[in-house]
Image (spheres, rainbow, N blue to C red):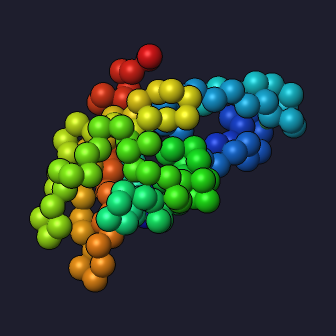
């Protein structure tokens, strides 16, 4: 499930302005070559997913590259945080080892205060008490969100 970052180029001259995953915000970038502002709107969220790994206490021990972009936080900052800090609806006691767990209406609290609606799957690691939280960004809910 590899995701490539989008390349955002100047529409007039083709200069690469930035790479990233645009989710909820529209970005305005000035092309230094043309000296004109270009607007980039969020792309389709259909295929955006990210994975977080936590230990049995819910402390994050790994974050995928996609998680860094979606949550706009570097991996070093995410690791060590409690899952409930960035995902307030997540209840650690609800998940049972050896049983797949599905959170249909889950949400992440983004740094700018917005909620990112996701569907999450909890998958336990066979060899440890760690678990992976696979999050699929909900395209319908998020595209209509303006709060
Ligand atoms: Zn340009």
Indicate whether 19 appears above or below 22.
Answer: below
Horizontal arrangement in the rendering, residue 46 relative to residue 113 (left or right): left
Indicate whether 1 appears above or below 17.
Answer: below
Count of labels shown?
A: 0
Q: Position of residue 37 (x, y in %)?
A: 76, 24
Residue drawn at point x = 24 percent, y = 65 percent: 123
Q: Position of residue 100 (x, y in %)?
A: 15, 62
Q: Nearer the viewer, residue 85 or 119?
A: 85
Horizontal arrangement in the rendering, residue 20 relative to residue 145 (left or right): right
Residue drawn at point x = 20 percent, y = 45 percent: 103
Q: Is residue 133 visible?
A: yes
Q: Is residue 66 visible?
A: no
Residue drawn at point x = 52 percent, y = 58 percent: 80
Residue 21 lies in quadrant: top right
Residue 55 lies in quadrant: bottom left
Q: Position of residue 31 (x, y in %)?
A: 80, 34
User: Can you tell me which quadrant of the image ligand 1 is in?
Assistant: top right
Indicate whether 17 appears above or below 54.
Answer: above
Horizontal arrangement in the rendering, residue 43 relative to residue 35 (left or right): left
Horizontal arrangement in the rendering, residue 99 relative to residue 112 (left or right): left
Q: Nearer the viewer, residue 91 or 70?
A: 91
Indicate whether 108 appears above or below 123.
Answer: above
Q: Residue furthest bottom?
A: 127
Q: Residue furthest top?
A: 147
- Location of the C terminus by quadrant is top left
- Location of the N terminus by quadrant is bottom left
Residue drawn at point x = 56 percent, y = 29 percent: 112
């Amino acid at each position: 499930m590899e995701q490539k970052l989008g390349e955002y180029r100047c529409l007039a001259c083709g200069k690469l302005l930035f790479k990233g995953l645009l989710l909820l915000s529209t970005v305005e970038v000035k092309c230094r070559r043309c000296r004109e502002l270009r607007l980039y709107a969020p792309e389709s969220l259909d295929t955006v997913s990210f994975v977080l790994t936590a230990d049995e206490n819910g402390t994050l021990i790994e974050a995928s590259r996609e998680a860094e972009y979606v949550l706009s936080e570097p991996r070093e900052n995410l690791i060590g945080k409690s899952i409930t800090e960035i995902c307030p609806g997540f209840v650690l006691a609800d998940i049972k080892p050896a049983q797949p767990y599905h959170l249909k209406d889950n949400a992440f609290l983004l740094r700018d205060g917005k909620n990112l609606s996701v569907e999450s799957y909890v998958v336990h690691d066979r060899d440890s008490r760690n678990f992976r939280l696979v999050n699929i960004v909900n395209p319908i809910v998020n595209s209509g969100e303006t709060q």
